[in-house]
Amino acid sequence: MKLQSKINLFSTAMFIVLLLLINSAIYFSFSRMLYDSALERVTGEAKQTVKGINRVKGSIPADDLLRAYVPANGMLQVVTADGSRIASVTTAEQSELRKKIGKVTKDEQKKIMTFNGTPYAVVSIPMIWRDGEVVKLQLAESMGAVERNLNTLRAVLIAAMLLASIPVFLSSRLLSNFITSPIASLTRTMKEIQESGRYKKIELPKQSKDELYQMGETFNNMIAQLEANYQKQEQFVENASHELKTPLTVIEAYADLLLRRGKNTPELFEESVEAIHSEAHRMRNLIEQLLLLAKHDEQWNVEMENVALKGFVEESIKSFREGFKREIELFIEADATVVTDPQKLKQLLYIFLDNAQKYSDKKIKVNVKIRHHQALIEVIDFGMGIPKEELSKVFDRFYRVEQSRARKTGGFGLGLPLAKELAAAIHADVKLESEPGKGTTAQVWLDMPASH
C-alpha cells in the first residue's frame, strides 16, 4: 500500500473512531440523564399518590381510588408483604406488566425495566393501608417517549458522523498529497539521476520552512556534495593518470632505446638505467602517497599518547638533517607535552621539512611554542613563497603553485593534502603562512593534556 493511501486511510479511520467515541459518550450520558430524570419524576408522582390515598376517608373501592392516580401509559398497584395484590389498575395491553414487578421490600425502590421492548420507570414505596397493614405502592410508567427521543438522537449522531467523514476523507487526501508530494518528487529525481547518471536537484517552495522543506534542502545539499566529490574524483583520476603516464612513457622510451642501441653504447646504457630507476622511484613515491590519501580515518591505526615535544622534535630534526645534509636551526621557546600519535606526527613534520628543503636552498628554522593553550610547531623556510591567492588551494590534491617546477623538485602536489589528512587523524590543525620572495611558515597546532 502506498504511503498516500496509508495516510488517507489511517487519518480517516482515526477520525471516525474518535467521532464514534465522542458520539457514544454523548448518547450514553444523555440517555443516563433522561432516565435518571424520569425516575425522579415518577418517584415524585408515587409520593404524591401516597399522600393523596392517605387523605381519602371512607369506603371508596381500592381500584377506583387507584384509577384516579394511575398514569395513562403505566400501572399502579398496591401489594402486601407476601406479594398478593390488594388493588391493581392498568390498561389491557399492559396487564402482563404486573408479573414483571419485583418482590415487595420495606425499602423504597426505583429502577428502569424493559417490557415488550419498551422501557418503564418502576418505583415502589412503602405505605400504611387503611387497616394499618404495611403495604407497597408500585407505580410503573412507560418511557416510550424518552426511548423515541434517544432513537432520534442516535440517528442524528450516526448521520452527523457519516456526513463528517466525507470532508475528513477529502481533507486527509489533500493532506496525504501535501505530505507525499515532496517525497514523490524526491523519488522521481533519484530515478532520473539513476537513469541518466547526471546529478539533479529538486525544486523547493520558498514560502515553506517545515520538515519536508528541510528534507528537500538536505537532499539538494547532499546532491551538491556528491557532485562536487564526483568532480574531484574525476579530476583526481585524470591527474593521477597523467602523473603515472609521464614516467611510464619515459621508462618505455628508454627501454626501447636500450633494446636498439644499449648493448653497443655503454654511456647510453648507464643513462637509460639511471632514468628508468629515477622514474620508477618517482612512480613508487606517487603510488605510496596515493594509497595513503585513499585511506579513511579508521584505517590510520592511530595510537594516541603523551609525547614530550622537546626530545621528539630534536630527534626528528637530527634524522632529517643527517639524511638531507641541510642546516636546520631549532628554537624551543617552551617545552610542552602533547597528546598525539608520534609516528604520524613525525611523518607530518617530514612532509613540511621536505617541502622546505625542496623550495629553499637557505637554512630551515623550526620553532616550538605554546600559544592559546596549545602547542605550536613551526617549520620556516626562506624560499620563493606562495602567492596569497593560492594559499587556499595548496591542500588540494595534485595542485602545484608552479607546474614548471614540479619536475625539478619531484613533487606531485600530494604532500600537503597528505599532511592535512594526517593532521585530521591525530586531531591536529595545520596552517600555512607565506609571502612571495620571503618564504613559507608551516604551522602544526597540537592539543595538550588537560592537566598540563
Image: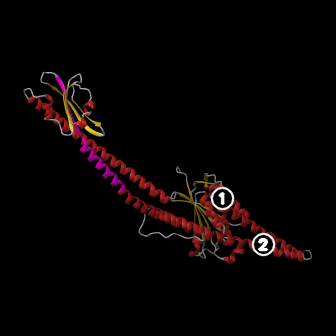
Q: Residue at the location (13% across, 32% down)? A: 64
Numbered range of the magenta stretch: 134-162
Q: Is residue 411 above or below residue 179?
A: below
Q: Is residue 148 above or below residue 173?
A: above
Q: Residue at the location (81% across, 71% down)? A: 276
Q: Does residue 345 appear to the left or right of 169 in the view shown? A: right
Nearer the observer, 151 or 58:
58
- Mark identifier at residue 346: 1
- Mark identifier at residue 88: none
Q: Residue at the location (70% across, 67% down)? A: 326
Tell me the amino acid under the disc marked 1. Answer: Lys
Q: Which residue is mark 2?
A: 248
Q: Give the alpha-carbon distance from disc 2 to disc 1, as whole Å.
A: 31 Å
**In the figure, residue 239 lies in which quadrant?**
bottom right
Where residue 375 appears, as percent x and y from the top left, is 56, 58
Nearer the observer, 94 or 248:
94
Q: Nearer the N terminus, badge 2 or badge 1? A: 2
Tell me the amino acid under the disc marked 2. Answer: Leu
Mark nearer the viewer, 2 or 1: 2
Instruction: From the image, give the main secondary structure of the stretch colored magenta.
Output: helix
Where residue 296 appears, as percent x and y from the top left, is 64, 59
Which residue in the rendered view is the most extreme toward the front? 92
Where residue 441 appears, as percent x and y from the top left, is 59, 68
Q: Does dot 1 land on a helix, a strand or a loop?
A: helix
